[in-house]
Each structure stands twice: as structure tokens, then as C-alpha cells.
Amino acid sequence: MTDKILLIEDEAKIARTVRLYLEQDGCQVAVIDDGALALPALRYERPDLVLLDLMLPHLDGREICRLIRRESTVPIIMLTSRSDETDKLIGLELGADDYITKPFSPREVVARVRAVLRRSRGQVQPPPIVRIGGLEIDLAGHVVLMNQSPLDLTPIEYDLLAALAGHPGQVFTRLQLLEATQSAAYEGYERSIDQHIKKLRAKLGDDARNPRHILTVFGVGYRFAPEGRP
């Protein structure tokens, strides 16, 4: 199924770049550059997701978000050059699902789009507690136990473990794991995942040369052993 994206952005260069990356990712993208055209375009295109710039001619993004929410539950990601926390909170309170501050990486936009679409379709509903061997992860309480002893994990280590152990056997690329940590998905940061995995393995008691839990898939990324290696 091809995802339809409505991009409402008046900066032509940004619109072209974002559209190119989304289309390369398999999306169908419609672009408008005037806030007054937002609702007619929404009704005509019937998109799966809206990328909405905050500063637009004739009608700003916050008002557009308010109007969209009166008639649709379509996921909305706001794009803005403002970094003020108040603006972000206002956008989220109006019904936006996510918020990206300019300047951003086009790959970050694609990753955020995919993440919001998955959430909106209920595709990322892991079980509240994951148990694999002696490992227990309380996803609701953010508590991790190994053989009944709590593990002291950083937020990024916890996010990585929750993503991997929540889908045992599934191979994750570094970019997917970067997305799971909710970090900006810049290509140059992908290799930083290796260092976090190294530290996480150590806390899990994994031998770096022959890990029991987090396995390396060479040339791709990592996966979590379904039952843990003996």
C-alpha cells in the first residue's frame, strides 16, 4: 500500500527535498504552498499523513491544524523554524502528532513519518512485559530485570533494548534503532548505535565475541535472540 502524504510548505527548496526523499521511500506526495488551500487539498487528496509548516501565507499552521482536527483524525507532523517549547506545546495541544524543528535532515523527516504512521495504525503496541530467559522488561514501568536484579540503563540503552527485545528475531538496521531512541535520524549518527549496543551488551552480561542476547547481523544491523543463546 502506498502512503499518501500532504506536504504544506511554502519554502520551495525544502518542499522539493522532502518530497524527493519521501517519494524515494515509496510515498505519494502532494505539495501545496498556501495555507488557504490546506482544507480543500485535505478533502481532495485524503492523505494518510499531513506534514504542516507552521509559518504559511494567508493561514498559519496552528490555525490549519485546528481546522483539520474539526473534521479529521489524520496524523499531523508540524515543521517549523521556531524552537520555542511553548510553540511546540501549542501545536501538540491543537492535535499535532509530532513536531520537527528546522533545519532538519530529510532522512529524519522520513523516519518520523514512518514512526507516526506505524503508531496511528497500531503497529507498535508491544506487550507490557517482555520475558526472555532471565531478562524481564516492564515496558509500562521502564523497569528492566536480569535474573530478578534491576539493570541501570541509560534512556537510549533502554529504548534500544525495548525495541530489540520487544520484537525478538527481527533484524533492525542502525537507522531503525536510531529512530527507536527518538534521536534525530542523521546518517552520521547511525554508527553511534554500535557504541550504545556495546555498553548494553556489557550490562546484559553478553560476551562481545559471542553475545547471547543481542546478535550482530553483519552488513545490516542487530537482532535479539528469541530465547537467548545457551
Image (cartoon, helix red, strand yellow):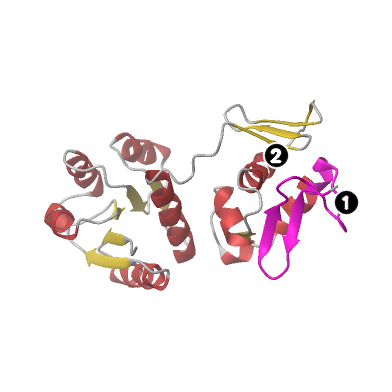
**Residue 204: image x %, image y %?**
80, 42
Q: Residue at x 61, y 47 (%)?
A: 167
Query: Can you identify the residue that label 1 sits on?
Result: 207
Residue 23 colored in magenta in the image: no
Amino acid at pointer 2 = Thr
In the rendered image, the vertical position of residue 150 relative to residue 30, given as above or below: above
Numbered marks: total: 2
As drawn, is 184 to the left or to the right of 24?
right
Amino acid at pointer 1 = Asp
Question: How far is mark 2 from mark 1, CA to CA?
Answer: 20 Å
**Residue 108: image x %, image y %?**
48, 59
Q: Residue at x 24, y 49 (%)?
A: 61
As drawn, is 165 to the left or to the right of 184?
right
**Residue 224: image x %, image y %?**
70, 50
Q: Residue at x 12, y 55 (%)?
A: 36
Q: Secondary structure at mark 2?
A: loop
Marks 2 and 1: which is nearer the front? 1
Provide the residue span drawn in magenta: 201-229
As drawn, is 106 to the left or to the right of 128?
left
Instruction: Please tell me the numbered disc located at residue 154.
Output: 2
Q: Residue at x 49, y 39 (%)?
A: 125
